[in-house]
Image (cartoon, rainbow, N blue to C red):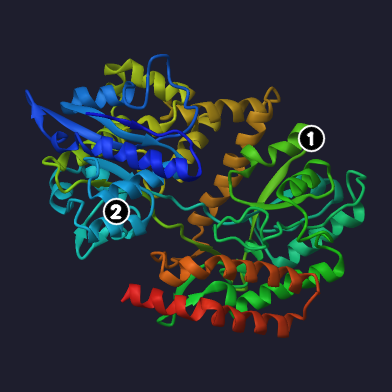
Amino acid sequence: MKKCFVTKLTGIAVTTALLLSMTACSSDSASSDSSEGGVINVSLGRQTLQNVAFPEGDTYEDNAYTRMAEQELNIDITDEFEANGDDYDRQVSLALSAGEIPDMMKVGSLDELKELYENDLIADLTEVYEEYASDYLKEVYDSYGGRALANVTIDGQMMALPGTNTDSGPSIVWIRSDWMEQLGLEIDGDNDGCITIEDLEMTAKEFMDKNPENADNVVGIALAPWLTSGDPDGTFSMNSIAYALGAFPKTWMEKDGEVVYGSVTEEMKQALSVVTGWFQDGILDPQVGTRTWDDITALLANGQCGIAFGTWHIPDWLLSNVYALNNNAVFEAYVLQDANGKVNCKHNDATNGYIVVSKKFDHPEVAIQIANLFYDELVNSPELLEKYPEVAAYVTDGVDGSSRPFNIEVNSYTSLLDDYADLERCVNGEISIDEVKTSEQRSNASGIMAYLDGSGDATGWSKYHSRSKGVELIQTLTENDQFSWLTPVFPQTTPTMETNSANLDKLEEETFIKIVTGDIDLESGFEQFVTSWNEQGGTQIIKEISEELQ
């Protein structure tokens, strides 16, 4: 079989090269599902990453993972095309247009999945999933309460194997606890990790007034110029404040049987009112709207600001910048509660990536067997790693998971907390490091324990904050049943979204900044924003989403 390996090109060269390469690829694809001597030939569309650290001689097509799959399942894997980023999306589009797709490939969007289905190019996996999927694999998908499989079910048929996407958890408020201790501040009397908007405001004022690190140009709270985020965690955004007031910006949802866009609600206006008040009182960064992501990171690192918003893992890659300049810095993780003491949070889309199987492929069950091997047996059977020491080395050395036949993750909805429970038992001395299940958590446990006994480094500091503070907070909130979850609508891209979304997003972000900084009045400005948003396509998008849902 001829193989296509796509490199980064631009402009006309991309189109010409891809058309030529697709023609070459398709010429030999007809025999891809034939078998010789009992071996089943499997062609893949392979989504790659740049600069994956393979051992010498290994490639995406021929590596420890693919060799294990070939031996265990009696298959022969060939990459019909390989590409990364936008080039991969173009390859998928060209294959779809040509009506010839590899035996199996990943697609990244619901739009592509539905287009493949409507063009009758992909196999119905309902029966083979029911017959071949392991009990564990089914349990993993079922842990999402039906949301993951619902995303790949079209007209009652399972048309893809979904990658899973666990929830990010709440947008956490990270506060310099060494400053709070120095200033004698207490904001969480019952120690449940929940604080109010008023607690946050008071803390920001105290940090500005007392200036614990004697820094110049101190800032109480700094926000990114886009203010809100569609991501649940919304690093450097005002999502925490919005959620605490019942607003879900940049979110499609159903309310009282109607499709609603969260940025145009009364609750969103209330959230903007709070932040506008902060700006007027000097608590909010006076340069909001122009301060870049890197600028805000620098404010934190330089001791000019002691409050940051973001998900549980930002200590690993963002707050670590603070520790790099001040190894005495310590943060505590909090969440903002609403008036009822609940922590409002929204689900991620339960699906991230789709593995589809060509309708022409004679052995669709092989896709399920590959999933069993990598997302069940490799996870739960130590004997498999003993049998394949080169695979064990991949796991230990952290060779990127994209090197597996399917570049998706299939994890239990509770995997984050499950891993944390294992790590916590080790840190507390209940089990040894060797008894920790995964190499990642063994490494985390070692770093955390080194940090706690005073011999750690930046990695130990980061893992202690992200796991023993961030994930521990999520665990506590879960145990206390303090989350109130919203399940958004995750629509297919509608025609008006495609043409109008960029302008609507620009309208939203520019208006919100003007409201917060006082350039326009909150009441009249927000009312005009809602009117303009509806007139410029919002009403039509809601109509189109409603029709999709029906």
Q: Which residue is found at the position 49% from the left and 55% from the top?
A: 478
Camera-nearest residue between 83 and 414: 83
| Mark 2 vs 1: CB contact within 8 A | no
Residue 453 appearing in the image? yes
Give coordinates of residue 536: x percent, y percent: 55, 78
Q: Nearer the viewer, residue 136 or 6?
A: 6
Q: Earlier in the sequence, mark 2 or mark 1?
A: 2
Q: Quadrant of the N terminus?
A: top left
Looking at the rendering, which quadrant does residue 377 occupy? Answer: top left
Please indicate whether residue 492 sits to the left or right of residue 213 in the image: left
226 to 259, vertically: above or below: above
Residue most toward the left?
37
Residue 328 is marked as 1
Cα gap from disc 2 to disc 1, whole angstroms: 44 Å
Quadrant for the C terminus in the image = bottom left
Q: Which residue was labeled with disc 2?
A: 142
Residue drawn at x 63%, y 25% as measured from the top left: 450
Name the residue: 82% across, 57% down. Answer: 220
- Whether residue 432 appears in this view of the structure is no
Residue 8 drawn at (x, y percent): 48, 36
Asked if residue 320 is positioned above or below residue 60 in the image, the reply reads below
